[in-house]
Image: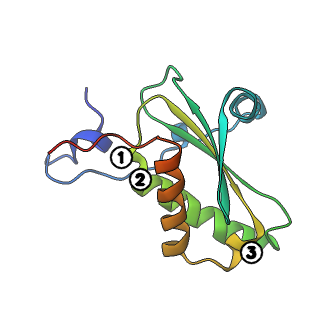
Amino acid sequence: MPDDATTGGPDGRKPRLRFPKAARLTQTAEFARVRMEGRPVHGKMITLGVLKGVAEKDGRVGIVTSKRVGNAVIRNRVRRRLREIFRAMRPRLIPGLWLVIVAKSPAAKATLAVLGEEFSQLAQRGRILRELTS
């Protein structure tokens, strides 16, 4: 059965942008694998750890926000924004991808739009976007 995220919603018109728990990296070993086997792409506000060619069809993401980013309220806000950015970009990412997004302290003051722009630039530099077909 095709996934709604790539083929569209139940009516077949608009892609559904979901972010299920299965799309998240949760185990310490998964984060370590991305760190050891993947390659980083650095930006001013975030760093992407990219591991390509993992067996799963859909990409998965883990988000790291240390206390350097700010207090708990700020860290949670940054995490929510980064999850939203990944959720919206997920249909455009290549399959079989694990990402670890590490927020840096400037991310605390950034808006969703600014973080999204940086994520898009890092995704292009990391070559993790699907080729657009006309």
Q: Are marks 1 and 2 in contact (CB under 8 Å)?
A: yes
Residue 45, by quadrant, is bottom right
- Using the numbered discs, state the Cα–Cα distance from disc 3 to disc 2 in whole angstroms: 25 Å
Q: In this rendering, is residue 75 above or below 18? A: below
Camera-side mark, 1 or 3: 1
Q: Residue furthest right?
A: 67
Report how far apart the C-alphas of labels 1 and 2 lie in the structure. Answer: 5 Å
Residue contact between numbered discs 1 and 3, judged by CB atoms under 8 Å: no
Please tell me which residue lies in front, 35 or 12: 35
Q: Is residue 84 left or right of residue 50?
A: left
Q: Secondary structure at mark 2?
A: helix
Q: Which residue is mark 3?
A: 73
Residue 37 position within the rendered picture, expressed as x and y whole percent measured from the top left:
69, 26
> Label 3 is placed on what type of residue?
Val
* Mark 3 vs 2: CB contact within 8 A: no
Mark before the other along the chain sequence, 3 or 2:
3
- Badge 2: few (under 14), some or many (20 or more) residues near its Cα, within 10 Å? some
Return the x and y of residue 7 as percentages of the image width and height: 22, 40
Residue 64 picture location, percent across and down: 73, 53
Residue at 47% from the left image edge and 58% from the top image edge? 120
The residue most toward the front is 125
Q: Which residue is mark 1?
A: 92
Three-letter residue code for mark 1: Arg
| Numbered disc 1: secondary structure | helix
User: From the viewer's perspective, is residue 55 above or below residue 97?
Assistant: above
Q: Secondary structure at mark 3?
A: helix
Residue bearing the label numbered 2: 89
Residue 67 numbered tag: none
Quarter of the figure with residue 91: top left
Q: Position of residue 111 (x, y in %)?
A: 56, 78
**Along the line of sight, which residue is nearer the eye, 4 or 46?**
46
Q: Earlier in the sequence, mark 1 or mark 3?
A: 3
